[in-house]
Image (cartoon, grey):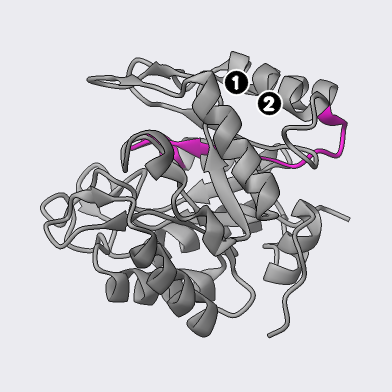
Amino acid sequence: MTPPCIICVAITGSLPTKADNPAVPTSIAEQIESTHEAFEAGATIMHAHVRNEDETPSSDPEKFARLKEGVEKHCPGMIIQMSTGGRSGAGKTRGGMLPLRPDMASLSVGSNNFPTRVYENPPDLVAWLASEMKTYDIKPEIEAFDLSHIFRAAAMHQAGEIAATPYVQFVMGVKNAMPVDREVFDFYIHTVKRLFGEDAPWCAAGIGPNQIVLNEWAISSGGHARTGLEDNVRLDRTTLAPSNAALVKRAVEICEKYDRPVATWQQAREILGLRKVAV
């Protein structure tokens, strides 16, 4: 049987604003509504950032708490994944929401260049974030911007810093980081299987116009897919995406093209080894 595909929707991020696309949800109420639409379209993971009223990024745990409460109410069973990324805060403020015990949280295990800055993930901070995730039974999603990040995740897993088999997401298309390259993508898959086992789940995310490229590569190769307005605000060069749900529906269509069933939230939790929830 063809394995089901988990679709993650990255609803907001830290950078896109309503000036880029009016559909970008920035208030908590908008994020909950947008997530609900994406959930109904087929997404089973929501990747969460929060914003201030002026649309600047925030790491305020109270905002994350309200978002989590709303998603749990309106999208029962959906996997909530909170971002600990460096654009939203500095130092340990990046993990201030982890005591809320989301199902998952992003974990960048190494530094790399971004378009205009160094994306810093110093080893001591990475170790602390991983420790907090273990404490609160949160599964990390390893954001791999480089091959070395996959090997670092393997070393952390072997040392017991990451409890279960790491869930690695390949991020491709960030300017000054890893470009979209099919041979590298295929080697990433090979490396994950070699380090974590043939059945280890993995995901891929493409930035900007590369989103649909990585969706197609991941879905056709047996992996899982990330989409959403955080990474890409357009359907094509001339058309803004009307919603997160529209981008999810596009990923669902790619699943249909390759005869991949879209994972239910129950299947997604089982594939990722997440705790069960009563709904």
- Disc 1 versus disc 2: distance between alpha carbons? 6 Å
- Report x, y in % for residue 143: 54, 33
Kind of residue at disc 1: His
Q: Which label number is shown at residue 136?
A: none
Kindly identify the residue that appears in the image at 23 percent across and 52 percent down.
Answer: 239
Q: Which label number is shown at residue 153?
A: 2
- Callout 1 touching callout 2 (CB < 8 Å): yes
Secondary structure state at the residue bearing disc 2:
helix
Q: Is residue 189 above or below residue 233?
A: above
Residue occupied by mark 1: 149
In the depicted view, which residue is nearer to us: 216 or 128? 128
Q: Is residue 14 above or below residue 61?
A: above
Position of residue 209 in the picture relative to residue 103 (left or right): left
In the depicted view, which residue is nearer to us: 44 or 161? 161
Crowdedness near tag 1: few (<14), some (14–19) or many (≥20) residues, C-alpha within 10 Å: many
- Location of residue 204 by image quarter: top right
- Report x, y in % for residue 22: 17, 62
In the depicted view, which residue is nearer to us: 128 or 182? 128
Magenta region: 196-211
- Report x, y in % for residue 176: 34, 15
